[in-house]
Amino acid sequence: MEISLQPEIIGSLVGIPISNSLILSVTVASLLFGCGFFAVKSLSLVPRKLQNGVEAALSGILDFMAQVIGGDKRQAYLFFPLVATLFLWFLGSFRTEWRQRFLAFLILWLKS
């Protein structure tokens, strides 16, 4: 088993090396952007089921952050975008990485 900190270089585009980490980052960023775009696109003043659920979840997370920080909602509002973005980024990266490994294993298994 070899441990390496360098990413695997898959190819190059105009002299810029393309690695598996770059592909994963671009995939996660585009998924987050697409989900955010479609979430904002369908907002309305009278919320429907999905919007109600998302607003309830965000309110719960904000209340939880306020409790963890020390009861100050202003601090929770200040740090919420950063914490939520990092959480979604790590969650998306982990899930996408897991899917890529599963698909690679499945392809290798089907070829044999």
Image (cartoon, rainbow, N blue to C red):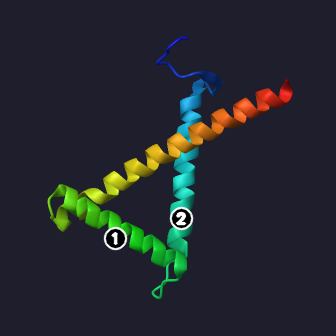
Residue type (three-letter) at the residue carrying disc 2: Phe
Image position, residue 96 (x, y; %): 58, 42
Residue type (three-letter) at the residue carrying disc 1: Ser
Earlier in the chain: of badge 2 and badge 1, it is 2
Residue for point 29% across, 65% down: 62
Residue for point 50% across, 71% down: 40
Residue occupied by mark 1: 59
- In which quadrant will I find the C terminus? top right
Q: Secondary structure at mark 2?
A: helix
Residue 42 appears in which quarter of the rendering? bottom right
Left or right of 88 on screen, residue 77: left
Image position, residue 27 (x, y; %): 58, 44
Left or right of 61 on screen, residue 70: left
Q: Nearer the viewer, residue 8 or 63?
A: 63
- In which quadrant will I find the N terminus? top right
Distance (Cα) linking label 2 and label 1? 20 Å
Residue occupied by mark 2: 37
Image position, residue 89 (x, y; %): 45, 47
